[in-house]
Amino acid sequence: MIDPITVISLMAEALGLSIDLKEAAKAYAKKVRDTERQSFVAKWRTGQQKLRGMRSDLTRFLHEWYSSTASASDDFLGIRYYSRNDSPNTSRVLPLVTKKGQLLADNPNFRGNAEYCGRLLEQNPNSHVGLTDDELVEQVSLWSALGMKIFDAPLYSLQEVSAEGDMKFRLTRFFVYRPTFGALPDELTLAVADHRIEEIRNNPDEYLPLRSKILPDLQVLTEFAGRIVAGGPAVLFAVTLPKGDVGVLLQRRSRTVSDEQGVFSVVPKAFHQPMVDADSEVSLRNTVLRESYEELFGGEETGGYVDPVHYLQKCDAVRELADPEVATIQPTGLVWDLSRGNYHPLYCCFVQDPHWWERYKSSVRLNWEVDPEVRPLVPLSDSKTLANILGNEEWAPESYVALVEGLRWLAKGTKMSTKFSQSVKSLLPRMNLEPMAAVARS
């Protein structure tokens, strides 16, 4: 992470804040003294631990928050998965919403194309947020205490979505997103560290002031053109193995990343952002390939290249993925999370070439923390491990949908061995889209 005072200065400039850096430096120094740092870290860890133990309560809370302002014309739906025994007690609801037709399983015409429409027209990015100097310093102090990796870069912001999932984007910056919508999960973590959900629900302005200010209701959540809507693809990466088997790659996210620390995730998973040219790189397929280079093969993230697809010349494995004879990059859906209001296009990258994995498996490097229940490459022939993975609660929500819907497409829409596809189908949970209010009541 770059120097925190520099971060404060750059974020203030990006947000249009006029900030006294000397006073900001004093405030920052005060907040990161040993006692304050220890307090920050302890409170954060308590909040994270509580959140892991109250996923269902948190999901209901967020659905209740936004469904309470829904009108009859709102068409956003909650996602519920039922295990194969169809018991009501074994359903899983997620803090996500989607729209009718925005999942491949629900709409075979779902496409996920992308178009670039220029920079955000907002003259002052902070005008509709109202972030104060003190709030900015508080956030940077928290990130510094926790050792989070914070960077600035261009970032696509979703502006519009068609019925078939075609998306339009404008350009913003990470330093505008992170202390605003990107800080909403931080606020929730710190709130639950000291307070019960019932207290937070009854006093949202006191315990969740940032959410109450910038993402207060369903209207703001769904008016994409009126706010920053960051996000990016969550990709189930599947490879053909010997004897017709298929393996999927999974990882546990690092505890030092900007968000979703320590949870299970598909890989690659990243923000949708350009490195060279915003117009030519707007395709989500480009981001899937670039992030495969970075997250699977340890490719460098540094900029400065003239060619936006320079990584194709550096990595034979990824260059082959761009060949439709070798791999299929299939969009499987689009969801939005209620935590930050971010969008998440879901993909499955299926390598049908049976020799690709043997050629390049020794070069794959995942950000993996050892876990006794799963391993980085899970063969679909291992029904027991697959069932455990599908039943695991420690998943980033959008990654879980990418996993399930990616497996659903693999089992139904590819030439995977009938023996394995039938086994996978028997394990996959049944999806049900329902009104947000129904999720809140369950």
Image: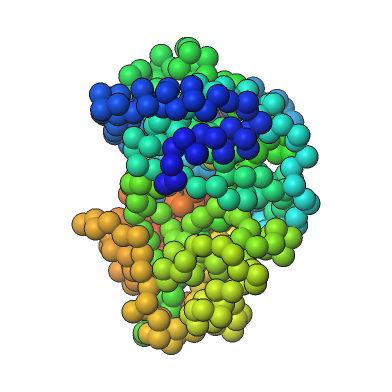
Residue 424 lies left or right of residue 409; in this view the side is left
Residue 194 lies left or right of residue 276; in this view the side is left
Q: Quadrant of residue 370?
A: bottom left
The percent position of residue 41, horizontal first and vertical second, equals 29, 31
Q: Name the residue at 35% across, 18% down.
A: 195
Residue nearest the observer in this picture, 138 or 9: 9
Most extreme residue toward the left, as rendered? 372
Q: Name the residue at 34% across, 38% down.
A: 146
By what rule are the colours in the image chosen?
Answer: rainbow
Residue 59 in sight from this viewpoint: no
Q: Quadrant of residue 223?
A: top right
The percent position of residue 357, horizontal first and vertical second, equals 40, 81
The percent position of residue 232, horizontal first and vertical second, equals 57, 52
Q: Name the residue at 43% across, 42% down.
A: 3
The percent position of residue 259, horizontal first and vertical second, equals 43, 43
In the rendered view, tell whether residue 113 sits above or below residue 400: below
Residue nearest the observer in this picture, 258 or 377: 258
Q: Quadrant of residue 129?
A: top right
Residue 390 in sight from this viewpoint: yes
- Total label count? 0
In the rendered view, tell whether residue 200 sits above or below residue 293: above
Q: Name the residue at 32% across, 65% down.
A: 376
Most extreme residue toward the front, as rendered? 22
Residue 343 lies left or right of residue 356; in this view the side is right
